[in-house]
Amino acid sequence: MDNIITGAIAVSIFLAFVLGLAESISALPFAVIVIAVCCMILTDFFQSAKEGLQEERKNKSEATQ
């Protein structure tokens, strides 16, 4: 659960910085790159969070047996 919280904080800070930078630069090629990178980081975060939750559930079920 700690990984999800710290990951969400890190992703939100990264997105705020990069999207603000893209807005201030206002160049279309840079905006396209930023959007692609943001999609990749969000996809990775959600996949990592899903795997982490599954692992926690597995460890809890093994501990109770």
Image: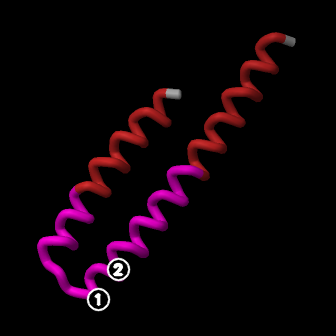
Pointer 1 and pointer 2: residues touching (CB < 8 Å)? yes
Numbered tag placed on residue 33 in the rendering: 2
Q: Where residue 12 appears, x then y in whole percent?
A: 34, 48
- Span colored in magenta: 17-46
Location of the C terminus by quadrant is top right
**Rendered position, 44 above or below 37:** above
Nearest to the observer: residue 63 or residue 15? 15
Amino acid type at mark 2: Ile
The quadrant in which residue 41 appears is bottom left
Q: Is residue 36 left or right of residue 55?
A: left
- Residue at horizontal 41%, vertical 42%? 8
The quadrant in which residue 25 appears is bottom left
Real-space CA distance between mark 1 and mark 2, rounded to the nearest whole angstrom: 6 Å
**Rendered position, 56 above or below 27:** above
Q: Where residue 29 appears, x then y in whole percent?
A: 29, 88
Q: Residues within 10 Å of mark 1 (few under 14, many from 20)?
A: few
Residue pointed to by mark 1: 29
